[in-house]
Amino acid sequence: MRLTLYFREYCSLCHQMLAELAPWRERYGFELAVVDVDADAALVERFDELVPVLMDGDVEICHYHLDAARLAAHLDAP
């Protein structure tokens, strides 16, 4: 499984979510792509003030803060 974290370098919430994902990655073994929204105008338009946003494809798992319950449910789903 590969999740994507839409991120901004200067965003403290983004860095916090990235750090909080580390033990989840270790436990579940998913890949994590970290994408800087400011590198793409279309991503800025889509996510702008929502970052950080954690996605699995087109499915949003959470934004602003890591939602551990939603992430667990998503990762444990068959």
Image: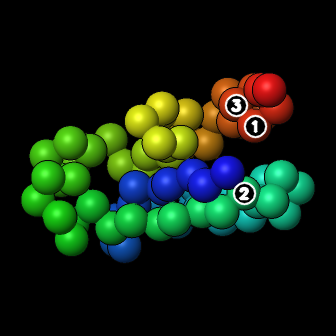
Using the rendered view, name the quadrant where residue 11 is placed. Answer: bottom left
Q: Secondary structure at mark 3?
A: helix
What is the crowding at mark 1: few (fewer than 14 residues within 10 Å), some, or many (at least 20)? Answer: some
> What amino acid type is highlighted by mark number 1?
Leu
Indicate the position of residue 12 as horizontal and vertical percent values.
45, 63
Q: Secondary structure at mark 1?
A: helix
- Vertically, is 75 above or below 44? above
- Residue most extreme to the right: 27
Using the rendered view, name the quadrant where residue 41 is placed. Answer: bottom left
What is the crowding at mark 3: few (fewer than 14 residues within 10 Å), some, or many (at least 20)? Answer: few
The residue nearer to you, when weighing 50 against 76, is 76
What is the crowding at mark 2: few (fewer than 14 residues within 10 Å), some, or many (at least 20)? Answer: few
Inter-mark Cα distance, 1 to 2: 9 Å
Tell me whether the residue at label 3 lies in contact with that at label 2, contact meaning CB atoms closer than 8 angstroms: no
- Vertically, is 59 above or below 18? above
Lower sequence index among marks 3 and 2: 2
Indicate the position of residue 57 as horizontal and vertical percent values.
47, 42
Tell me whether the residue at label 1 lies in contact with that at label 2, contact meaning CB atoms closer than 8 angstroms: yes
Inter-mark Cα distance, 3 to 2: 12 Å
> What amino acid type is highlighted by mark number 2?
Phe
Tell me whether the residue at label 1 lies in contact with that at label 3, contact meaning CB atoms closer than 8 angstroms: yes
Using the rendered view, name the quadrant where residue 58 is placed. Answer: top left
Q: Is residue 13 visible?
A: no
The answer to whether residue 31 is left or right of residue 61 is: right
> What amino acid type is highlighted by mark number 3?
His
- Residue occupying image coordinates x 22% and y 48%: 48
Q: Secondary structure at mark 2?
A: loop
Circle 1 residue: 75
Lower sequence index among marks 1 and 2: 2
Circle 2 residue: 30
